[in-house]
Amino acid sequence: MSIFIRPSSESDLDAITAIYAHAVTHGTASFELDPPDKPEMARRRNALLEGGYPYLVAEKDGTILGYAYAGAYRTRPAYRSTVEDSIYVAPSAQGQGVGRLLLTALIEACETRDFRLMVAVIGDEESKGSIGLHQSLGFEPVGILKGIGYKHGRWLSTVLMQRPLGRGMLEPPTRPIR
């Protein structure tokens, strides 16, 4: 059976929480230091969905391999058409194209919602896989914030990348101010 990308559901929260806990504990994709529990992950997911953002999972044979969502890049109204992407893949599924499938579907979902720009804030300059994935899907590097976070006993930088969505900046946004 192939990998299926679909909107997340509440029943996915155990897997989502476990995938994120591993990323927080062992990786640099998130600058959180302590993994949140399932109720907190549910609260975060619900807030994104209520805000009109996509929240997707990758599933194969009933197992969640990863998840991705878009959220507000910043909360000020002028940023309403810009989203930040987040992608997390289970350790056992890394290197199998799950991240590419999720990011491709996330881009499409954001375009159907008339978002105009997607920003990637990639933790750690050494995250070559994430940087390469984003670059291969049309993201351009726009900067590096050096030594902005401290985790796992070292200073970490973040790589900033961006990609236009849909009509991009060709015309004013249609998204209402919230």
Image: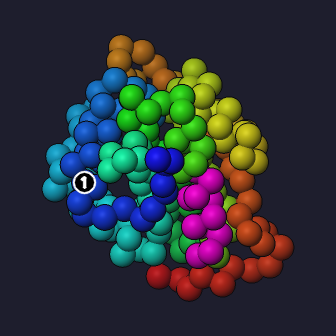
- Residue at 60% x, 44% y is 100
Along the line of sight, which residue is nearer the eye, 142 or 52? 52
Query: x, y percentage for residue 118?
Result: 63, 57
Query: Number of labelled discs?
Result: 1
The rendered magenta stretch, by its main secondary structure, is classed as helix
Question: Quadrant of the rendered structure where residue 31 is?
Answer: top left
Along the line of sight, which residue is nearer the eye, 160 or 17? 17
Query: x, y percentage for residue 81?
Result: 61, 70
Judge left or right: residue 146 versus residue 29: right
Q: How is the image coloured?
A: rainbow
In reply to whether residue 104 is colored magenta, the answer given is yes
In reply to whether residue 120 is colored magenta, the answer given is no
Mark 1 = which residue?
13
- Residue at 17% x, 46% y is 37
Query: x, y percentage for residue 21?
Result: 27, 36
Category of crowding for the residue at label 1, using alpha-carbon neighbours closer than 10 angstroms: few (below 14), some (14–19), many (at least 20): some
Query: x, y percentage for residue 174?
Result: 66, 84
Q: Is residue 79 above or below residue 90?
A: below
Q: Is residue 106 above or below residue 97?
A: below
The magenta segment? 103-113
Along the line of sight, which residue is nearer the eye, 63 or 127? 63
Q: Is residue 152 above or below residue 48?
A: above
Residue 127 in view, yes or no: yes
Secondary structure found at label 1: helix
Judge left or right: residue 91 versus residue 146: left
In this view, which residue lies farthest toward the right? 170
Question: Quadrant of the rendered structure where residue 99 is?
Answer: top right
